[in-house]
Image (cartoon, grey):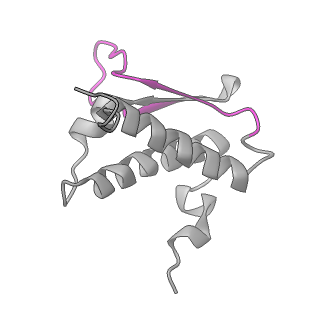
Protein backbone atom coordinates (compact mmCIF):
# COMPACT_ATOMS: atom_id res chain seq x y z
CA UNK A 1 0.00 0.00 0.00
CA UNK A 2 1.28 3.45 -0.83
CA UNK A 3 -0.03 6.97 -0.97
CA UNK A 4 1.06 10.61 -1.04
CA UNK A 5 2.17 10.56 2.61
CA UNK A 6 3.75 7.10 2.56
CA UNK A 7 7.15 6.07 1.17
CA UNK A 8 7.19 4.23 -2.12
CA UNK A 9 7.07 0.46 -1.85
CA UNK A 10 10.32 -1.24 -2.81
CA UNK A 11 10.44 -4.88 -3.75
CA UNK A 12 13.30 -7.36 -3.48
CA UNK A 13 13.62 -7.11 -7.28
CA UNK A 14 14.06 -3.33 -7.02
CA UNK A 15 16.76 -3.71 -4.37
CA UNK A 16 18.50 -6.47 -6.34
CA UNK A 17 18.53 -4.48 -9.60
CA UNK A 18 19.68 -1.30 -7.83
CA UNK A 19 22.59 -3.19 -6.27
CA UNK A 20 23.53 -4.77 -9.60
CA UNK A 21 23.40 -1.39 -11.37
CA UNK A 22 25.43 0.41 -8.69
CA UNK A 23 28.08 -2.34 -8.68
CA UNK A 24 28.26 -2.39 -12.50
CA UNK A 25 28.61 1.41 -12.59
CA UNK A 26 31.40 1.23 -10.01
CA UNK A 27 33.28 -1.41 -12.00
CA UNK A 28 32.81 0.49 -15.28
CA UNK A 29 34.34 3.56 -13.65
CA UNK A 30 37.37 1.50 -12.62
CA UNK A 31 37.74 -0.40 -15.92
CA UNK A 32 36.34 1.94 -18.60
CA UNK A 33 38.14 0.36 -21.56
CA UNK A 34 37.47 -3.28 -20.67
CA UNK A 35 33.83 -2.69 -19.65
CA UNK A 36 32.77 0.00 -22.12
CA UNK A 37 30.33 -2.33 -23.89
CA UNK A 38 29.28 -4.30 -20.78
CA UNK A 39 25.65 -5.37 -20.67
CA UNK A 40 24.06 -6.89 -17.60
CA UNK A 41 20.66 -8.55 -17.54
CA UNK A 42 18.75 -9.86 -14.55
CA UNK A 43 16.55 -12.91 -15.03
CA UNK A 44 14.64 -14.83 -12.37
CA UNK A 45 15.99 -18.35 -13.08
CA UNK A 46 18.42 -20.01 -15.48
CA UNK A 47 17.33 -22.51 -18.10
CA UNK A 48 18.48 -25.77 -16.62
CA UNK A 49 19.57 -28.22 -19.32
CA UNK A 50 18.94 -31.89 -18.54
CA UNK A 51 21.89 -33.65 -16.98
CA UNK A 52 23.48 -30.49 -15.54
CA UNK A 53 23.93 -30.57 -11.79
CA UNK A 54 23.75 -27.44 -9.70
CA UNK A 55 21.99 -24.17 -10.38
CA UNK A 56 23.85 -21.32 -12.04
CA UNK A 57 24.02 -17.94 -10.29
CA UNK A 58 25.15 -16.15 -13.47
CA UNK A 59 26.10 -16.75 -17.06
CA UNK A 60 28.76 -14.95 -19.06
CA UNK A 61 28.48 -14.57 -22.84
CA UNK A 62 31.81 -13.01 -23.89
CA UNK A 63 31.03 -12.54 -27.59
CA UNK A 64 28.12 -10.25 -26.63
CA UNK A 65 29.91 -8.65 -23.62
CA UNK A 66 26.91 -9.85 -21.63
CA UNK A 67 26.51 -10.99 -18.03
CA UNK A 68 23.20 -12.55 -17.03
CA UNK A 69 22.52 -12.72 -13.29
CA UNK A 70 19.87 -15.09 -11.96
CA UNK A 71 18.13 -13.38 -9.07
CA UNK A 72 16.34 -16.27 -7.37
CA UNK A 73 19.37 -18.59 -7.05
CA UNK A 74 21.49 -15.70 -5.80
CA UNK A 75 18.90 -14.60 -3.25
CA UNK A 76 17.62 -17.96 -2.09
CA UNK A 77 20.48 -20.41 -2.48
CA UNK A 78 23.35 -18.34 -1.16
CA UNK A 79 24.36 -19.10 2.39
CA UNK A 80 24.76 -15.97 4.46
CA UNK A 81 26.18 -16.09 7.95
CA UNK A 82 23.86 -13.23 8.88
CA UNK A 83 20.46 -12.67 7.27
CA UNK A 84 20.13 -8.91 6.88
CA UNK A 85 19.98 -6.32 4.08
CA UNK A 86 23.67 -5.47 4.23
CA UNK A 87 24.83 -9.08 3.89
CA UNK A 88 22.33 -9.72 1.09
CA UNK A 89 23.69 -6.68 -0.75
CA UNK A 90 27.26 -7.94 -0.32
CA UNK A 91 26.24 -11.30 -1.79
CA UNK A 92 24.76 -9.62 -4.87
CA UNK A 93 27.84 -7.41 -5.24
CA UNK A 94 30.14 -10.42 -4.98
CA UNK A 95 28.23 -12.22 -7.73
CA UNK A 96 28.55 -9.15 -9.99
CA UNK A 97 32.29 -8.96 -9.23
CA UNK A 98 32.80 -12.67 -9.95
CA UNK A 99 30.75 -12.62 -13.17
CA UNK A 100 32.45 -9.47 -14.50
CA UNK A 101 35.84 -10.90 -13.52
CA UNK A 102 35.03 -14.03 -15.49
CA UNK A 103 33.98 -11.89 -18.46
CA UNK A 104 37.24 -9.93 -18.66
CA UNK A 105 39.52 -12.69 -17.40
CA UNK A 106 40.48 -11.13 -14.08
CA UNK A 107 40.32 -12.34 -10.52
CA UNK A 108 37.39 -10.61 -8.75
CA UNK A 109 39.75 -9.39 -6.00
CA UNK A 110 41.85 -7.62 -8.66
CA UNK A 111 38.91 -5.62 -10.01
CA UNK A 112 38.86 -3.20 -7.07
CA UNK A 113 41.78 -4.00 -4.76
CA UNK A 114 41.55 -0.76 -2.77
CA UNK A 115 37.87 -1.26 -2.01
CA UNK A 116 38.63 -3.97 0.53
CA UNK A 117 41.61 -2.33 2.22
CA UNK A 118 40.49 -0.59 5.39
CA UNK A 119 43.84 0.56 6.75
The answer to if 11 sits in the magenta stretch is no
Q: Quarter of the image holding residue 65?
A: top right
The answer to if 52 sits in the magenta stretch is yes
* Residue at x-position 77% and y-position 48%: 32
* Residue at x-position 43% and y-position 51%: 94
Camera-side residue: 46 or 88? 88
Q: Quarter of the image holding residue 43?
A: top left
**Percent coordinates x, y for residue 49 in the rendering:** 34, 14
Residue 73 falls left or right of residue 69: left
Residue 98 falls left or right of residue 83: right
Outermost residue on the bottom side: it is: 119
* Residue at x-position 29% and y-position 37%: 6
Q: Is residue 23 above or below residue 68?
A: below
**Start and end of the magenta stretch?**
36-60
Outermost residue on the top side: it is: 50
Q: Is residue 106 above or below residue 102?
A: below
Camera-side residue: 103 or 95? 95
Outermost residue on the right side: it is: 33
Q: Is residue 101 above or below residue 54?
A: below
Q: Quarter of the image holding residue 2?
A: top left
Residue 12 falls left or right of residue 68: left
**Percent coordinates x, y for residue 26 in the rendering:** 62, 52
Q: Please tell me whether the stretch drawn in magenta is mainly helix, strand or loop.
A: loop
Camera-side residue: 8 or 46? 8
**Percent coordinates x, y for residue 82 in the rendering:** 19, 60
**Percent coordinates x, y for residue 93 in the rendering:** 45, 50
**Quadrant occupied by the N terminus:** top left
Report the number of numbered marks.
Answer: 0
* Residue at x-position 39% and y-position 37%: 16
Amino acid sequence: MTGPDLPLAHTRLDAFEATVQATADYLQDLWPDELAALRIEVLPMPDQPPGVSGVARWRVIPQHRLVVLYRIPIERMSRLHREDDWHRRLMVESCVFRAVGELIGKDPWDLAPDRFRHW
